[in-house]
Amino acid sequence: MIEVKNLTKYYGDHLAVDNISFTVEDGEILGFLGPNGAGKSTTMNMLTGYISSSSGQALINGIDILEDPIKAKANIGYLPELPPLYQDMTVMGYLNFVYDLKKCKLPRKSHLTEICNLCKINDVSHRIIRRLSKGYRQRVGMAQALVGNPPILILDEPTVGLDPKQIIEIRNLIKKLGKRHTLILSSHILSEIQAVCDRVIIINKGKMAADDTLENLTKSVSSINRITVRLDGNRDEVLGAIRLINGVKSVRADMEREGGIYDYEIVLEDGADIRVMINEMCKEHGWSIYKMANDEMTLEDIFMRITMGEDMPESRSDMPKKIVRLTTPEDIKQAEPEETFSEAVEETVSTDDNNGYTAADDSEKEEAEE
Amino acid sequence: MGAIFRREMGAFFSSPIAYVYLTVFYVFSGVCFYLFTLSYGISDMSSFFSMLFWAGFLLIPVLTMRSFSEEKMQKTDQGLLTAPISLGGIVLGKYFAALVMYTIGIAIIFVYALILSAFGTVTWGIVVSNFIALFLLGAAFISVGVFISSLTENQFIAYIISLLLLFVMCVMQELAGLVENASVPEIFEPIVGAVATGMNAISFYNKFYDFTCGLFDLSSVLFYVSFAAVFNFLTVRVLETRRWK
């Protein structure tokens, strides 16, 4: 188990990590997500004792990394951003060195062979590391972290620089490892986190922007209810009919998909479900439904909302002032009353202004054109 | 410590460093042995030994320049510093590997002494005490080299700075002479005298010279050993403070 309490790191005057707190339970796979330079690696380096925190505390299985570093480090397998490989050694020589370095007690030969099999490096085990490809080096780095079978694994961008096939392999390996180890994994690749992690922490500019399960995160941020319907029928008539339905906030017609068939993007009030009503409306008018979809947010959307929010605050002040708020802070709080990520909510709100702004603005334009 | 020591030894021999160091040391000492001992037809090795003092000074930075610089450059220090070992263990592992490497070099003097014993009588006591002198000198110098290496990522800079520092230490007694003879107002003379005495006290050559004459002085041994301990401690401090930056 990893407990992080108010961890802060200054590099000189520069605040790299700002008051981060979280807990990782045994057997959990935690994804650490953030743009480059957000403080992911710094946080991981503090957890593994490579650098010291300016303030705050990190407990590794209950042991403070600064108070008893040797004992705490014995619980961690760490793959830094750049695997710490000695170029002049063979893969096996290097793993033997790490085995000695970690004062590993497991039977040497069978343990190292098992790791080589797991990381699929047995066919290069007698080659010099300098001559290995990037993908193999990454895997040796992974093997190095696994030596001694530490209960906690911390992997900093484990798939960086690998080809798609290797990425899938490493991802499968991580999933397999997640069953036996507590795992923290950092990445700026969202699909990767989505593929393997139980829980996500989004970190931006050194601050924690969100900490939740993927499912909750998607639910809470996408509490803007949106539905897309593809219908035939006269466009203006359809727009008019949809506007009459209870619970519809706004609607706009998207591009013409086929002759006379349009996509209609409907924004709903919270909790409203109009699918049945749409069906009935169509029956009434003799229109046909070609497609109906609830727009779900992907991790990409969430990530963009949370991390981009701060970057585009005043730039749009030239736009019309009338803002249709899709979500208000109250809405979010109602939707997720006992959420632990109040910070995320705050961030979301500030972004929602922008996003709601553009969406509403577009629909207004669209409507005006009509 | 053991793991790092073994890796360092392996790295010496898988890189050119061990071969360059041993070749240069053996050739240099061989030439000196011929010039200062064999060619005169004498069995006194003292001038030969005083030349080895300078060989040690030139070659020790070669052994130590990459110890921490390269780790930092290749980012392999991250592996060491996040492993469950103490900083002292890391420093001592590297320190003793360089010391053993150095000792493999200086052990050649026993071969020369054996050769000489075929032609005349060799005072083995003097040979052994010279070996101890060279060993202790190396023990002190290597700690300085490792310390300098922990300060920079660049091996070449590590070599040059170590060389410079060792040079100042080697000529300390000459500098002390200069200070002693400097013409200063009378009231400063006690101060100057004290400084010169101090500089003479930490002179490496004076202590080395005592050993080469067969004078085994325990205080000199303590001086070398504590000098090495201080610099190894400083290296640990450098690694420690780097974390806090």
Image: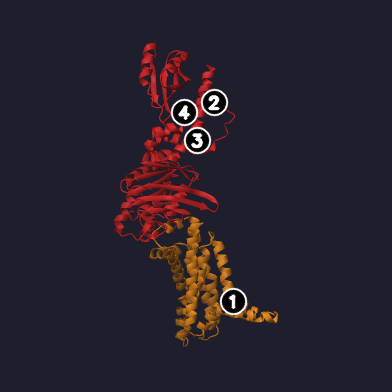
Chain colours: A red, B orange
In the drawing, does residue B134 fall left or right of residue A229? right
Q: What element carries label 1?
A: helix
Q: Is mark 4 on a helix, strand or loop?
A: loop
**Circle 1 chain:** B
Same-chain check, marks 1 and 4: no
Q: Residue A326 carries which label?
A: 4
- Expressed as whole percent of the image width and height from the top left, the position of residue A248 reads 43, 21
Q: How far apart are marks 1 and 4 (CA)?
A: 79 Å
Name the residue at 52% across, 63% down. Answer: B149
- Within-10-Å neighbours for mark 4: few <14, some 14–19, many 20+: many
Residue at which label 2 appears? A322
Residue at which label 3 appears? A350
Q: Nearer the viewer, residue B143 or A247?
A: A247
Q: Is mark 3 on a helix, strand or loop?
A: helix
Nearer the observer, disc 1 or disc 3?
3
Whether the residues at callouts 2 and 4 have beta carbons within 8 Å, the answer is no
Q: Does the rendering let one see residue B101?
A: yes
Residue at which label 1 appears? B172
Q: Distance between the residues labelled 1 and 2?
A: 81 Å
Whether the residues at callouts 1 and 4 have beta carbons within 8 Å, the answer is no
Number of numbered discs: 4
Whether the residues at callouts 4 and 3 have beta carbons within 8 Å, the answer is no
Name the residue at 47% across, 66% down. Answer: B18
Name the residue at 45% across, 79% down. Answer: B110
- Expressed as whole percent of the image width and height from the top left, the position of residue A29 reads 36, 44
Q: What residue type is labelled 1?
A: Met
- Expressed as whole percent of the image width and height from the top left, the position of residue A224 reads 43, 29
Q: Nearer the viewer, residue A288 or A353?
A: A353
